[in-house]
Structure formats: C-alpha cells, structure tokens
Amino acid sequence: MESAIAYHHKRALVIGINSYSRDPLKCSISDAEDIKKVLERIGFSVALGIDSNRDEFYDMIDEFATRIQRTDLILFYFAGHGKQSDNENYLLPSDYDYDYRGSERDYIINHAINAQYIMKKIDDKCCRITILIFDCCRKPVKDRSSSLQGLTAMHASSHTVIAFSCAPGKTALDETQNGRNSIFTGSLLEHIATPNIRIEDIFMNVAREVHSQSGGFQRPFRSTDLTEKVYLVTHDVSARTVRQTSSFDRQQEVQDIMQIRGYSEATGLYSKYQDTSNKRINLKQFYTGMVKMRLIR
C-alpha cells in the first residue's frame, strides 16, 4: 500500500434528527445509529446525538472539540434537514421553528447551527485529517421536484474532505431500498469500512452508486484539500515483518507502528530506536520519546 497521512486516534461526532415540527424524517436516526456502529467497528471512538435541539447540538460540538488532539483523524456526520442563507450552510436542530416571525436570515442565524462553525472548531485544533459528511436537504420519495433549495458548496480547508449527499443547490432523497437508510448513507455504509481504499475513492464509489440508484436524480458532491492519501482502514501484509520487542500486544504493536511511523515529527524517533539489522523497534523507548514530544498521550 502506498504511503499515506498517518494518525493516532480516530474520533467521530455523529448526529441524526428525525423530529422536526414540519417535514419530519424517517431515516436520519437509523442512519446515525448505523454510521456509529460501522465507525466503531473500524476503530473510531464515537459520540452520538439523537434528535438534538439547538443547545444540545452546540454542547455536543463544543464538548467533542475539547477531546481533539492534533494527531487525530476527525469525522463529523450529520443526517437531518439543512438550509442555506447568504451562501452559508445551516444544520437544523430538532427545535427549529418553521413558523418564525421576522427576518429568515436573523432567525436561522440564531436558531440553526452554522456548518462553518463546526469546521472552524475542528480546524482550530489543527488535527491531522478532518472529514465532514452532510446527509441533509432531504425530501420524501414522492416529491422529486426541484423547487426545494439545497446547501451551497463549501470549500475544504487544509487536510479536510467535505462530502455532501447531493450537489450544491439540490436535494437528497430520504429513502433507500432497505427502508432504513437514506440512499447516500446506505451506500456509505457499504463502502466506508473497505480496507486499503483512499477516502476520496470511497466517496467516489458512493457518488456513483447513489447516482445510479436514484435514476440520476441525486448526485453527491465533495470538496477536498488533501495533499496525501488517507485510509480509514488498512490491512497491510508488510506489517507481518514487524517483530514484537516489548510487552505490547503484537496486534496493537503492528497497528500503532503502521499508523504512527508516517508522522513527520516521529521519523527521527523511529530511525533512532529501530534496529535495521533485524527490523525491530524498541517500542518502550519509541513511545517514551513520542510522549516527551507530546505527539501522543
């Protein structure tokens, strides 16, 4: 497998909302629950929010941000309703009142969650990789008109991938063949745990499948600013050459080395404590050095 951006921990915040006063959804909660399960299966620690109101939504974002370390891969997933206003995207909490009075712009600013706020909270932590997934702007299967307005495009910041369930200004279908997930999330669940595939290729495969399943109605969109390859799951046979040299469990040793050795800051440490004659590494000294450099806890 080709070299890639390395990271130490995978953390995710997953939120799904069905309960809206207008146009309640059927699949967002089950989408979020299923995404949580598959992410945990591939090594993520996951915080889950269900039918979160505005205050709960913000509290979850702020609490999640406090846990982010700069050696992390971070994933945020939202399933629910979203709107755009003045070229900014907003995610709607469960207590969003569609029967507001006054300016729509003022109301949405004060009662919805700005997607840029989420991206900035994560960016401020300078983590290794950020993946933002928005499965929103949903409509029922029977309403395939183009009158509803979807989200606007967002430009990915450094080391970030943003995936939308539909193209800018378009809407997504709250349906799939299994009756439990949206078309987009249903396809994402099928592909996201595939080993040794770049994250960009995962989203490309999802986009192709969604476009086909929706009869051309829905075309997912993504924005990326990755300069190196990113893999969520790796099974590399070359890891078999790594020998156990400390009390660390062999499986954990292989996983950690395969992920950590890619850090530019750790390159010197890895070389220092590696015995090139037998391809061993003194893990105790290596990890002690990593802690001193504050690359891991």
Image (cartoon, rainbow, N blue to C red):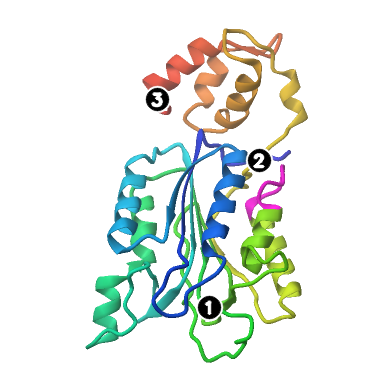
Residue position for label 2? 233
Q: Earlier in the sequence, mark 3 or mark 2?
A: 2
Name the residue tied to disc 1: 168
Q: Is residue 291 above or below residue 209?
A: above
What residue is rendered at 58% in x and 69% in y? 165
Q: Which residues are magenta?
A: 191-199
Distance Cα–Cα, label 2 vs label 1 = 29 Å
Camera-side residue of 284 and 74: 74
Q: Is residue 145 left or right of residue 127?
A: right
For the N terminus, the quadrant is top right
- Which SS type dominates the magenta stretch? loop
Horizontal and vertical percent for residue 84? 40, 78
Categorize mark 1 by other alpha carbons within 10 Å: few (<14), some (14-19), many (20+).
Answer: some
Q: Is residue 87 visible to the viewer in this orientation of the structure?
A: no
- Report whether residue 127 is seen: yes
Left/right placement of residue 138 relative to residue 71 reads right
CA distance for labels 3 and 2: 22 Å
- Residue type pointed to by label 1: Pro
First in sequence: mark 1 vs mark 3: 1
The kind of residue on which mark 2 rests is: Val
**SS assignment at label 1:** loop
Q: Position of residue 185 (x, y in %)?
A: 62, 62
Q: Residue at x 34, y 58 (%)?
A: 57
Give the secondary structure at mark 3.
loop
Q: Which residue in the protein does label 3 denote?
A: 297
